[in-house]
Image: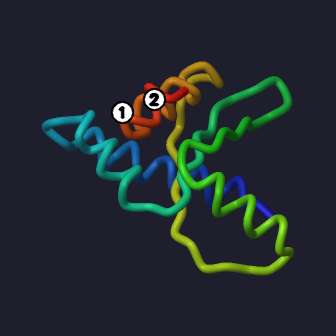
């Protein structure tokens, strides 16, 4: 079960980390590389939307096995789903982007 308050707090921490960095793009790449699962969160009419930036395989494995697994996770706040999809595309390895 997702804790939306925790995701908001994680996203706030990421925002602060990126804001204080000289190279904001590199800071964002470092955050994404450091965690097993990275979720983008964004406002929707229903409340909060989620999009998996990294770690969908891990989440699928957990869902299919119906077990608990240890994994690190964080969240990044973005304005909308389009930005979440763009962030996911821009942070996958180049060879995977070409294959898509």
* x then y, percent, for residue 54: 54, 49
SS at mark 2 in the image: helix
Q: Residue 18 sits in which quadrant? A: top left
Residue at (65% x, 57% y) in the render: 57
* x then y, percent, for residue 70: 60, 79
Crowding near the residue tagged with mark 2, few <14, some 14–19, many ≥20 C-alpha atoms within 10 Å: few
Q: Is residue 31 left or right of residue 79?
A: left
Compared with residue 96, is residue 66 higher up or lower down, i.e. above or below?
A: below
| Visual colour scheme | rainbow
Number of numbered tags placed on the structure image? 2
Q: Residue 41 sits in which quadrant? A: top right
Residue at (60% x, 19% y) in the render: 82
Q: Is residue 24 left or right of residue 69?
A: left
Q: Which residue is mark 2?
A: 97
* Figure quadrant of the C terminus: top right
The answer to whether mark 2 and mark 1 are in CB contact below 8 A is yes
Compared with residue 71, is residue 73 higher up or lower down, i.e. above or below?
A: above
Residue 78 image label:
none
In this view, the residue in front, 60 or 10, is: 60
* x then y, percent, for residue 60: 74, 59
SS at mark 1 in the image: helix
Crowding near the residue tagged with mark 1, few <14, some 14–19, many ≥20 C-alpha atoms within 10 Å: few
* x then y, percent, for residue 8: 59, 50
> What is the residue that sits farthest to the front in this orientation?
99
Residue at (54% x, 23% y) in the render: 83
Compared with residue 43, is residue 26 higher up or lower down, i.e. above or below?
A: below
Task: Report, in whole angstroms, how far the alpha carbon at label 2 lies from the one at label 1.
Answer: 5 Å
């Amino acid at each position: 079960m997702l804790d939306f308050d925790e995701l908001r707090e994680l996203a706030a921490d990421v925002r602060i980390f990126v804001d204080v960095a000289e190279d904001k793009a590199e800071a964002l790449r470092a955050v994404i590389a450091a965690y097993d699962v990275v979720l983008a969160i964004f406002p929707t009419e229903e409340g909060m939307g989620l999009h998996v930036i990294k770690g969908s395989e891990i989440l699928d494995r957990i869902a299919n096995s119906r077990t608990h697994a240890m994994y690190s996770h964080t969240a990044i706040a973005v304005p909308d789903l389009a930005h979440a999809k763009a962030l996911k595309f821009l942070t996958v390895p180049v060879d995977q982007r070409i294959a898509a």
